[in-house]
Image: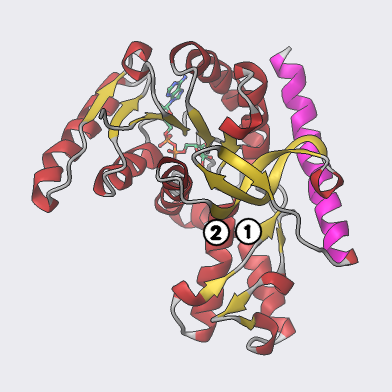
Amino acid sequence: MARTKIAMIGAGMIGGNLAHWAGMKQLGDVVLFDIAEGTAKGKALDLFEGSPVDGWDARITGTSDWKDCAGADVCIVTAGVPRKPGMSRDDLLDTNVKIIKDVATNIKEHCPNAFVIVISNPLDSMVYAMKEITGFPKERVVGMAGVLDTARYRSFVAMELDVSVKDVQAIVLGGHGDTMVPLRSYCSVGGIPVNELISAERLDAIESRVRKAGGEIVGLLGNGSAFYSPAASAIAMAEAYILDQGRILPSACLCEGEYGIDGYYIGVPAKISAKGVEKVIEVKLTDDQKAELANSLEAVKKVVEETKTRLG
Ligand code: APR
C-alpha cells in the first residue's frame, strides 16, 4: 500500500515545521512546495538527512513544480506573508489573497481529492477563498486556528495553576483575530471547571492574553509570526484525518446554519475523521457568549466581503 502523500504548500517557517512533525510522526511522505525552489529543496534535504538519527521513515522532497504535488491526499497551506510587529492579520489580505488564488487554482488541478487545511492569514477569509476557488466539498476544506487558539488558552491556564497542560481542556470559538471567544464555561482542569480553580479577574486577564497571543509572539520575534505551535496544531488536524481518529478539534468550518451562521467560515468545534470535517458540533452558549460570537462574526464578514471583491 502506498504511503499517504502530504503536500506542504509553502516551505517557510511553518512549512518546514509541518514537514518535520509529519515526518517524525510517520504520517506519510511529504512534498515541500514553494515558489522559492532552493528553500523547498534545501529544507527537504536537511529534514531527510536528519531522519536516520531518530529513525523515522518518511520521504521528504522539495519542489517548485506543482506536478510533484499531484495526487496529494492532504495539502496544508501556509503560502503567504506573515505579520510584522504592529500589523493585524487583516493587513495581510491584499498580498495573501493573490497567493491563495494561485495556490487554490493549482490544488484544484493537481490535488483534486485532497483534504485541505489552510493556515495562511487572515485565516477565516483565506479558507473561504480556498473553498470558493476549488469548489471542493466543505468536508475537505478547513482552516487551522481553533486548535492553536485553544492550545494557547490551555497553556496559560496550565502556567497559572502550575499543572500539566495535558489536563487542561478548553474551547475557543469565532474568528482567528482579537474578537475570538474563549469559552470559560467549557474550560476544565482534570474535569474540574476552571472557575473553581482560578478567580474571575485572573481568567479575564488570561482570556485577554489568549486573544492577543499571536501578536505577543509577533512582537517578541520582531521578524515574523508564530510557527512551532501553528505547525503542531495543523498536524493534529491532519493526523485526525489520516488516522481516522474522530477527534473533536476547534476548526474554521463552513457553517450552514450551525450557531445561526450561514455561508461563512468561522471557528467551531468539529469532528475530524477520515470523512474530513464530519460534523460541526453545536454547544450551548450563554447570552454573553452568543453576543461575543455575533461580534466576532461581524469582524469575519467584513474581511470576507473585502476578499470577495478581490476574487472578482
Ligand atoms: N506558492 C507557494 N509558496 C508561496 C507562494 C506561492 N504562490 N507565495 C509565497 N510563498 C511562500 C514564500 O516563499 C515563503 O517561503 O510562502 C512561504 C511563507 O513562509 P514564511 O514567510 O516563513 O511565513 P510563515 O511564518 O510560514 O507563515 C505563513 O501562515 O500563520 C500564517 O500569518 C501567517 O500568512 C502567514 C502564513
Give the residue pinned by disc 2: 216
Under circle 1, the secondary element is loop
Q: Does residue 179 lie above or below 261 as drawn?
A: below
Q: Position of residue 125 (x, y in %)?
A: 68, 33
Work out whether 188 lies above or below 131: below
Q: Which residue shows up at 76% across the image and 26% down it? A: 306
Residue 88 in sight here: no
Callout 2: SS: helix
Figure quarter occupied by ligand 1: top left
Amino acid residing under circle 2: Glu
**How is the model colour-coded?**
secondary structure
Question: Residue lying furthest front in this view?
Answer: 1
Boundaries of the magenta span: 288-311
Nearer to the camera, 305 or 140 = 140
- Residue under pointer 1: 212
Q: Are marks 1 and 2 in contact (CB under 8 Å)?
A: yes
**Residue 312 percent coordinates (x, y):** 74, 12
Does the segment drawn in magenta span residue 289?
A: yes
